[in-house]
């Protein structure tokens, strides 16, 4: 993701206030005040592997064994519950993508 960087303690700007954010089990830091607040946030803690990127869904343990990630459209069309869940996922994904685009423009 573009929002992540590999900032280390040596690169921190002394005396600059930080804002801490938590998203999907990951803790980020970013600078609070201009002109440094345009720099992307970076991971400082949490479990980056614990969630599916771009979603609030926990990553299943068997995630590494899944080879086919495309949805089964026929199955989704047959099941109202699956269609409802997949639609909710797409809406959340769209919000995430929009948020990322807006964050890049700042």
Image (spheres, rainbow, N blue to C red):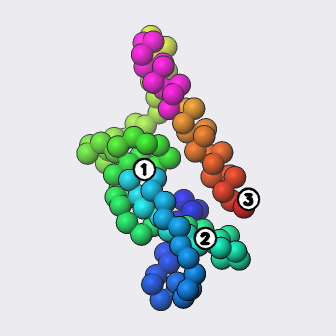
* Label 1 secondary element: loop
Mark nearest the camera among 3 and 2 is 2
- Asked which quadrant contains residue 62, the reply is top left
Task: Name the quarter where the N terminus is drawn.
Answer: bottom right
- CA separation in Å, label 3 and label 2: 16 Å
Mark nearest the camera among 2 and 1 is 2
Pointer 2 or 1: first along the chain: 1
Question: In this view of the protein, can residue 75 be seen by the observer?
Answer: no
Q: Are marks 2 and 1 in contact (CB under 8 Å)?
A: no
Farthest residue to the right: give it: 105
Label 2 belongs to which residue?
32
Residue 100 part of the magenta-drawn span? no
- Magenta highlight range: 79-89
Pointer 3 or 2: first along the chain: 2
Label 3 Cα neighbours within 10 Å, binned few <14 / some 14-19 / many ≥20 = few
Q: Which mark is residue 105?
A: 3
Pointer 1 or 3: first along the chain: 1
Q: Which mark is residue 97?
A: none
- CA separation in Å, label 2 and label 1: 21 Å
Q: Main secondary structure of the magenta part?
A: helix
Task: Name the quarter where the C terminus is drawn.
Answer: bottom right
Label 1 belongs to which residue?
24
* Residue 102 pos. (x, y %): 69, 52
* Label 3 secondary element: helix
- CA separation in Å, label 1 and label 3: 22 Å
Q: Is residue 25 left or right of residue 13?
A: left
Question: In this view of the protein, can residue 80 be seen by the observer?
Answer: yes
Q: Residue at x 71, y 77 (%)?
A: 35
* Residue 53 pos. (x, y %): 46, 49
* Residue 43 pos. (x, y %): 45, 67
* Residue 79 pos. (x, y %): 42, 12
């Amino acid at each position: 993701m573009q929002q992540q960087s590999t900032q280390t303690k040596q690169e921190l700007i002394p005396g600059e206030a930080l804002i801490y954010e938590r998203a999907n089990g990951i803790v980020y830091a970013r600078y609070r005040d201009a002109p440094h607040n345009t720099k992307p946030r970076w991971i400082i803690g949490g479990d980056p592997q614990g969630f599916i990127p771009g979603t609030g869904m926990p990553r299943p343990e068997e995630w590494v064994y899944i080879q086919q990630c495309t949805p089964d459209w026929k199955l989704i069309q047959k099941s109202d519950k699956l269609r409802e869940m997949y639609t909710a996922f797409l809406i959340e994904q769209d919000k995430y993508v929009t948020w990322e685009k807006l964050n890049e423009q700042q």
